[in-house]
Image: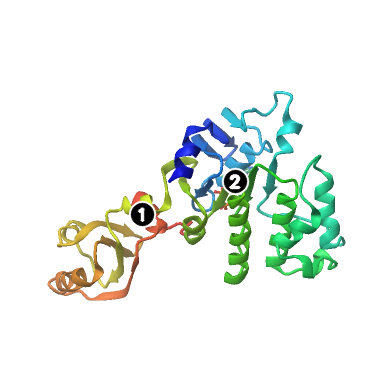
C-alpha cells in the first residue's frame, strides 16, 4: 500500500499522451495514453498485432511516433539528451540477436562497455543464473539461457527503466519462472519495468498494473486483480452446443453475470459454476440440445479480454 501511494505521489517514470503510429497498411498505435510510476511493473497485454511492440519501441526511442508526446525520466527524445536517457534504460527486444561466436561473459562485458556506469559483469551473470555458462559460446545456449543472457545484457547498465518485450515467449515453464524471478529481483531494487506479453499468468504474476491493448488502443487499465474483479464473476463456464440457443435466455439464468459468444463457444461469466451448470443443461435440454465441449475455470485476465472484445487473446 505504501509503495502504491508513494509511487503515485511522484512524477511518472514513463508517460505518453496521444501516441500514434501509422504504417502503410495499418494504424498500429491509435492515440495511446500511459503513465508508468517509478518502481512499478507495468504490463501491456494484448493479442498479436495489437500494437504493443510498436508502442514500446516508440517509448524506447527506437521508432519515431507520427503524433503524441513521450516523457521518460523527465526528459523527451530528440532534445539533445538522448545519450543520457539511453544510459538509464535497459532494453530487451522481442528477438535479441547476439553474436553466436562470443561467450556469455564476453557478451555481457560488451554490453557493459556501452554504459558509463553499471553493474559488475560477474554480479549480473550471478543474478541471471549464467555463471555455469560463462565460458560457453552464445550459439550453444538453450532458448531459456539465451533469454536470460538477453536479460543480463539489459540489466548490466544498471537501468532505472527496464523494457521487456515478451520476455518469456517460447520458454518452458521452468525457464519462464527463472526469468520472472530475475524481473522480480530488479523490481525489489526499485527498478521500473515495462513489459509486453500475451501470457495472462505472466501479467498477473509480475505486473502491478496492466493496460489491455487492442487495435492500438487501451481498452482497460488497472491492477490485474481489479480487472478480473471488474467482470463481477469469479468463474467461467465455456461450452459448445449441438444447435442454436438464445443468448438472452442464457443471460437470464440465475447466477449468470454475462454471456459472450466466442466463435463456436458460449462463454458464461458466473459467480459459481456448480449451481449454474444444471440450469444451463436444462435450458439446452428444453430445446432438444446437448452440451458439448464443456470446461470451467477461475476467471483470469484472458476472460477480461474476451468480455471486452468477444475474442480470445490468441484468436488472431
Ligand atoms: P506481437 O504480440 O505479435 O508482437 P504487437 O502487439 O507487439 O504484436 P506490433 O508488432 O506493434 O503488435 O504490430 C502492430 C501492427 O503494426 C501489426 O498489424 C503489424 O503488422 C504492424 N507493423 C508493425 N511493425 C511494422 C512495420 N515496421 N511496417 C509495417 N507494419 C508494421
| Upstream in sequence: badge 1 or badge 2 | 2
One can see residue 284 in this view = yes
Q: Is residue 5 left or right of residue 61?
A: left
Q: Is residue 255 left or right of residue 12?
A: left
- Which residue lies at the image location 36% right of the left edge and 50% below the top edge? 226
Q: Nearer the viewer, mark 1 or mark 2?
A: 2
User: For this rendering, which residue is in front, 268 or 192?
Assistant: 192
Image location (x, y in percent) of residue 213: 47, 45
* Secondary structure of residue under mark 2: loop
Can you tell which quarter of the image residue 245 is in?
bottom left
Residue that numbered label 2 is attached to: 190
In the drawing, what numbered circle is on residue 303?
none
Characterize the local packing of mark 1: few (<14), some (14-19) or many (20 or more) Cα atoms within 10 angstroms: many
Seen in the picture, residue 160 relative to 252 is either above or below; the reply is: above
Q: Is mark 2 within 8 Å of ligand 1?
A: no
* Identity of the residue furthest to the left in this view: 286
Image location (x, y in percent) of residue 111: 80, 49
Seen in the picture, residue 31 relative to 298 is either above or below; the reply is: above
Image location (x, y in percent) of residue 85: 70, 34
Seen in the picture, residue 218 relative to 225 is either above or below; the reply is: above
User: For this rendering, which residue is in front, 151 or 160?
Assistant: 160
- Which residue lies at the image location 58% right of the left edge and 52% below the top edge? 188
Q: Is residue 62 left or right of residue 32?
A: right
Labels in figure, total: 2
Residue that numbered label 1 is attached to: 228
Amino acid at each position: 500500500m505504501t509503495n502504491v501511494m508513494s509511487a503515485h505521489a511522484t512524477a511518472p517514470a514513463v508517460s505518453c499522451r496521444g501516441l500514434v503510429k501509422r504504417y502503410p497498411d495499418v494504424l498500429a498505435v491509435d492515440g495511446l495514453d500511459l503513465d508508468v510510476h517509478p518502481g512499478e511493473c507495468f504490463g501491456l497485454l494484448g493479442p498479436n498485432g495489437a500494437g504493443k511492440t510498436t508502442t514500446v519501441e516508440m517509448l524506447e526511442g527506437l521508432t519515431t511516433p507520427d503524433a503524441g508526446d513521450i516523457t521518460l525520466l523527465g526528459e523527451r527524445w530528440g532534445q539533445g539528451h538522448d545519450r543520457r536517457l539511453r544510459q538509464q534504460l535497459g532494453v530487451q527486444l522481442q528477438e535479441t540477436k547476439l553474436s553466436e561466436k562470443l561467450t556469455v561473459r564476453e557478451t555481457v562485458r560488451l554490453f557493459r562497455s556501452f554504459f558509463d556506469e553499471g553493474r559488475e559483469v560477474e554480479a549480473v551473470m550471478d543474478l541471471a543464473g549464467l555463471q555455469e555458462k560463462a565460458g560457453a559460446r552464445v550459439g550453444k545456449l538453450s532458448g531459456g539461457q539465451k533469454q536470460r543472457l538477453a536479460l543480463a545484457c539489459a540489466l548490466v547498465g544498471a537501468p532505472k527503466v527496464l523494457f521487456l518485450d515478451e520476455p518469456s515467449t517460447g520458454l518452458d515453464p521452468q525457464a519462464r519462472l527463472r526469468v520472472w524471478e530475475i524481473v522480480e529481483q530488479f523490481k525489489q531494487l526499485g527498478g521500473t519495468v515495462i513489459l509486453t506479453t500475451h501470457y495472462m499468468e505472466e501479467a498477473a504474476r509480475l505486473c502491478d498494473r496492466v493496460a489491455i491493448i487492442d487495435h492500438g488502443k487501451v481498452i482497460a487499465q488497472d491492477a490485474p486483480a481489479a480487472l478480473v474483479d471488474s467482470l463481477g464473476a469469479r468463474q467461467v463456464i465455456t461450452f459448445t452446443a449441438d444447435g442454436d440457443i438464445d443468448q438472452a435466455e442464457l443471460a437470464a439464468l440465475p447466477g449468470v453475470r454475462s454471456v459472450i459468444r466466442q466463435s463456436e463457444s458460449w462463454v458464461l461469466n458466473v459467480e459459481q459454476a456448480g449451481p449454474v451448470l444444471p440450469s444451463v443443461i436444462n435450458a439446452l435440454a428444453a430445446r432438444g440440445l446437448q452440451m458439448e465441449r464443456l470446461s470451467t475455470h477461475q476467471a483470469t485476465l484472458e476472460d477480461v479480454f474476451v468480455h471486452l472484445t468477444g475474442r480470445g487473446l490468441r484468436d488472431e
